[in-house]
Amino acid sequence: MEQASAVTRVGPEQRVVGDPTPGMVRERAVDVEGLWSGLVRTEAHMVSGWHHHGEHDTSIYVVDGAIRLESGPGGASVVEARPGDFVHVPAGVVHRESNPGDGTAEVVVTRSGRGPVTVNVEGPEPGTDAG
């Protein structure tokens, strides 16, 4: 990737749809070495496919609507976030996002790391049996 030599503006019409995961629309705004940033929309009551972001740490800021993230063994760890909340997803953590609300959820996502930005997988890590 080429290093920018000036401050730039990326308008809505310049965002590029990419990194598909079922149930989500990701629009890339900034993609430079070590940094990815964009807008993600999830329609009401939609659930994304399971995925992780490789070696990228991810910061999510909820602009509108609500999101729910499931991760951990069997997807049992749940975090819910609303407008004004930030969520951190560590690199490599398998998760899926959903929108429990009646309207579209809109979040700003920023990722820091190297390699593929989105890796879709079959499901969460297996749960454990107690006893």
Image (cartoon, rainbow, N blue to C red):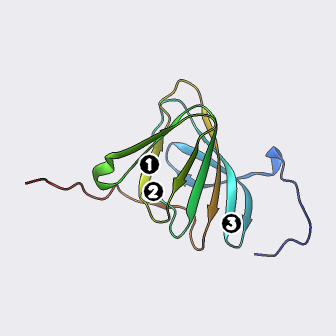
Cα gap from disc 2 to disc 3, whole angstroms = 19 Å
Which-is-in-front pick, marks 2 and 3? Answer: 3
How many marks do you count on the picture? 3
Q: Residue furthest left?
A: 131
Q: Quadrant of the N terminus?
A: bottom right
Q: Amino acid at mark 3?
A: Leu
Which residue, given by chain and number where applicable, does mark 2 sit on? 51
Q: Amino acid at mark 2?
A: His
Q: Report whether 15 appears left or right of 19.
A: right
Element marked by disc 3: strand
- The answer to whether one can see residue 48 in this image is no
Q: Report whether 45 appears left or right of 72.
A: right
User: What residue is at 23 percent from the left and 54 percent from the top?
Assistant: 127
Disc nearer the start of the sequence (2/1): 2
Which residue, given by chain and number where applicable, does mark 1 sit on? 96
Disc nearer the start of the sequence (2/3): 3
User: What residue is at 50 percent from the left and 35 percent from the top?
Assistant: 99
Element marked by disc 2: strand
Which residue, given by chain and number where applicable, does mark 3 sit on? 35
Cα gap from disc 3 to disc 1, whole angstroms = 21 Å
**Is there a contact, CB below 8 Å, between mark 2 and mark 1?**
yes
